[in-house]
Amino acid sequence: MDVQGIRKEFPLLDTKINGNPLVYLDNAATTQKPRVVTDALLDYYRTLNSNIHRGVHHLSQQATDAFEESREYVRLFMNAAKHEEIIFTKGTTEAINLVANGFARAFLKKGDRVLVTVSDHHSDFVPWQQACLQSGAEFDIMPVERDGTLDLALLEEKLALKPKLVAFPHISNGLGLENPASKITAMAHAQGAAVLVDGAQGIAHCRVDVRDIGCDFYCWSAHKIYGPTGIGVLYGRQEWLDKLPPYQFGGEMIEEVDLQQTTFAALPFKFEAGTPPIAEAITLKNALEFVESIGFDALREHEAQLTGLAIDGLRRIDGTEIYGKEEGHSGVVSFNIEGAYHYDIGVILDQLGIAVRTGHHCAQPLMKHLGIPGCVRASFAIYNTQEEVERLLSGVKKAAEMLR
Ligand code: PLP
């Protein structure tokens, strides 16, 4: 793979931080954007800007076509069965809130259960916790093993308690481990539970086929996969989306408004109240085309190679503890150095131009489960290089020497 060629598409990577060339290893938080995306955003505002779905004029129709083409591209990208099953949202968080809010209002009641995992991002954990508090349903939490994996025998026991819904991350953002999504979904369905997959990390690191996974909902954010912020996707099986009540009310989502009551528009518009982030939705397609032009096989191989190098190197630094099982990290390595505070390591790395994330990574239940206040997380993307991994390792060595 021509990594140097790919890097040319990302001008921001040429930035210097504190006099050092930037090493951007905070990709699990957000990826950088290729020129095809930033150019398309500018082009949209220069040539196409118009509100969609309600204009008879030329620009509005063109913008509407581009918006719906992007939705169709997303459908094909995820192998969803129907155009109507792709709902544009602000991102993963809004997509999950949309479903959790609908469940709390329409389906959950006292005596019901919802099952999540302890490795869930707060964006999947808190909406379901709150939905349970509102509805009186039981909030059940699957622990993970010390190596971050799910014990499927224990899962079977939890599922025997008949939760109405099971939510889990496709790939956890704290440890970067992929859950067996199709298997978990089949096990949950066998017990009558609906399944929501938090795909915020999954979408960027593996080929997602929602029909193969078989899940009822799959949620993700464009900014994690080289696209713009402010736009994300809720995939939902039509049977569920038809039953779920609208999340927000306003323009675009209505069929008929009378003085005392309103009927709602058909899918997908029922869940898309108000003017959406049009430019972002349209240019999301450019980001997905960019990923397709590289291909998931090449992307996965490259990320696995970098992650493997980082894990090997970190193991050789005295006092380093790496979280999660030995292999199979999807572009994420989380670690601590004995006797050093994770935040201080991040500050030293930043002085060297190396951007990593420190803290609880919006996964406080997981950190508590691991018995740590937080950790350092380096996360890799398609444009990272072996030299950058080496710079990370020498930065961590230096931090270890300074802080211990
Ligand atoms: N879920 C996971 C696994 C994530 O990694 C993230 C973001 O880091 C989210 C949910 C929330 O995504 P967003 O902030 O784009 O809504």
Image (cartoon, rainbow, N blue to C red):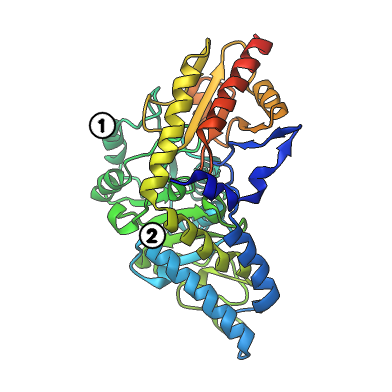
- Whether residue 74 appears in this view of the structure is yes
Query: In the rendered image, which quarter contains the N terminus?
Result: top left
Residue hosting label 2: 78
Residue 325 coordinates in the image, percent (x, y): 38, 25
Residue 173 coordinates in the image, percent (x, y): 50, 38
Measure how far apart labels 2 and 1 are at the Cα level: 29 Å
- Name which residue type carries label 1: Ala
Residue 360 or residue 394, whichever sits in front: 394
Residue 36 coordinates in the image, percent (x, y): 57, 61
306 with respect to 397 (left or right): left
- Name which residue type carries label 2: Met
Mark 1: C-beta under 8 Å from nearest atom of ligand 1: no
Residue hosting label 1: 153
Say which element carries label 1.
helix
Going from N to C along the chain, the mark reached first, 2 or 1, is 2
Name the residue at 66% across, 26% down: 349
